[in-house]
Amino acid sequence: MSCRIAVRATLALLFALLLITQPASAQTASSAATPAPAKVMLIGLWHFDNPGLGAVKFKSVDVMTPTEQAYLEGLAKRIAGFKPTRILLEYPVDRNEVMNQRYQDWLADKFELRVNEIYQLGFRIAKEAGLKRVEGFDVRDVKGDDSIWSHLMQDPVLSKEFAGMIADMSKRLNQMHQTMSVKALLKRNNHPDEDRENKSFYLWLNPVGADAAPHMGSNAATQWWQRNFRMYALVQKAAQPGERVVVIAGQGHTAVMRDFLRADLKRLEEHPDTYF
C-alpha cells in the first residue's frame, strides 16, 4: 500500500511540475517568434555643403580635410556596429533611383563622394553595414502662408527682434564651425540644448499675429511641424518590428522628430552620442 502511495505522489509531483513549466516554455517560444521593436538612430547635423543661402549664414567646417575624412570613415564603421538594416537620408523619395545608382557607382569606384552628408556619411555607413541600397525620406511639398514674413518686416519691434535673433544665430554658428571639429559639432548638434535652441525659434514665431485672422505665426510653426510629421511617417513605415534604422537629416528636423520618437511606444531610440 505504501508503495502505491509513493508512486501516486511521484506522479502528482511530476504533473504539477509540468503545469508550472509548460506555460513558461510556451511563453519563451512565443517571445522568440515575436520580432523585437524597431530601433531608430536619429543623427542630426548641418548640411556639409552649406551654400549660405538661408537667413542664418555661416561658413561650414571643411569636412574634406584629411583629418575629418579619417574621422568620418571611422564614424561610419562605428555606426555600422549598430547593425542597421535600413538607412534613411534627407532627399525626396522620388530620387531613390538616382541616388541608388550613384551608390552602386561609388561601390564600383565609378563615383566620387561629394561634400554633402548624404554621400560623406550616408553612403559610407550603408557600405560598412553591407546594405544594398539607401532610401530617401524628405518631404518638400508642404505649403504654407508666407504672409508672416511681410508682417514681421512691417512691425518695427518684431523686425528688430527677428534681425537680432538671426544675427546672433549666425554669429554663434560661425564661431562653432571655426573652432570645433566635426566630432564636437556632431555631439553639439545632437545635444538636447541644441534641439531646444532650434525649436525655440518656432515658438518665438508662434504668437506673431495671434490677434489677427489667420494666426500667421502659428500657421508658420505648424507648417514646419507638419513637414516633420510627414517625414517621420516615412521613418515609421521603414522602422517595422525587427528593423534597425539609421536616419540622417538636418538638425532642425531631428530636433522635432526626436520628440516624436520618444513618444512612439512601438519604436526604441538609439542615441548616436556614444558612436561619435
Image (cartoon, grey):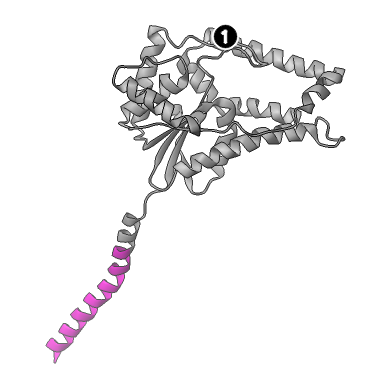
Where on the picture, by quarter, is residue 255?
top right
Q: Position of residue 54 (x, y in %)?
A: 64, 16
Say which residue label 1 marks.
59
Residue 19 drawn in magenta: yes
Of 232 and 98, which appears nearest the observer? 98
Image quadrant where residue 4 sits: bottom left
Residue at the far bottom: name it.
1
Q: Up-down: is 231 above or below 77?
A: below
Quadrant (top left/top right/bottom left/bottom right) for the N terminus: bottom left
Q: Which residues are magenta?
A: 1-26
Most common SS among magenta residues = helix
Secondary structure at numbered mark 1 = loop
Could you classify mark 1 by the number of other residues whose Cα lies within 10 Å: few (under 14), some (14-19), or many (20 or more)? some
Residue nearest the observer in this picture, 231 or 61: 231
* Above or below 12: residue 188: above
Residue 175 visible at all:
yes
> In the image, what residue occupies the spot 18% across and 87% down?
5
In this rendering, would 59 be left or right of 111?
right
Q: Is residue 149 above or below residue 26?
A: above
- 105 left or right of 214 in image: left
Residue 276 visible? The answer is no
Q: Position of residue 2 (x, y in %)?
A: 14, 89
Name the amino acid type tagged 1: Lys
Residue in the picture at 77% in, 23% down: 149
- Please check the rendered image and state whether residue 276 is part of the magenta-colored stretch, yes or no: no
